[in-house]
Amino acid sequence: VNKGKWCKYLVSHPKVALINAKKHFSVSEKEEQIIISHMFPFGIEIPKSKEAWIVVLNDKVASIYEFLLFGIIQGKLLK
C-alpha cells in the first residue's frame, strides 16, 4: 500500500466531494461544512455542527460495518 497516496486521499477526498456536490446540487454553507468535515479525524476540518457530527459518526459506523462484512466474506471465500 502506498502510504503517501493514501494520506493524500484522506486530505483531498472531502474537497473533491464538495466540488462534486456543488456540480449536482445547490449546497448551503452548513452542508458545505458537513461535507468538508465528514472525514474527521482523518481530514483536516473539525465538524462544527451537530449535523456534521452525526454524519461523521454514521460514516464511521458504516465504514466499520463494511470493513467487518468484507472481512467475513473474504474469510469465508478464502477457506
Image (cartoon, rainbow, N blue to C red):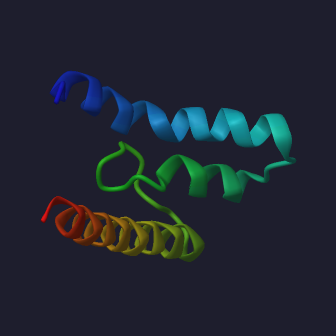
Q: Is residue 69 left or right of residue 57?
A: left
Residue at left 68%, top 59%?
30
Q: Is residue 50 above or below residue 59?
A: below
Residue at left 55%, top 34%?
15
What is the residue that sits farthest to the left in this orientation? 79
Q: Is residue 60 left or right of residue 17?
A: left
Q: Is residue 39 above or below residue 19?
A: below
Image quarter hosting the N terminus: top left
Residue at left 55%, top 69%?
49
> At which x and y percent is residue 50?
54, 76
Image quarter hosting the C terminus: bottom left
* 3 or 12, nearer to the observer: 3
> At which x and y percent is residue 24?
84, 41
Q: Is residue 15 left or right of residue 30?
A: left
Q: Is residue 16 above or below residue 75?
A: above
> At which x and y percent is residue 26?
87, 47
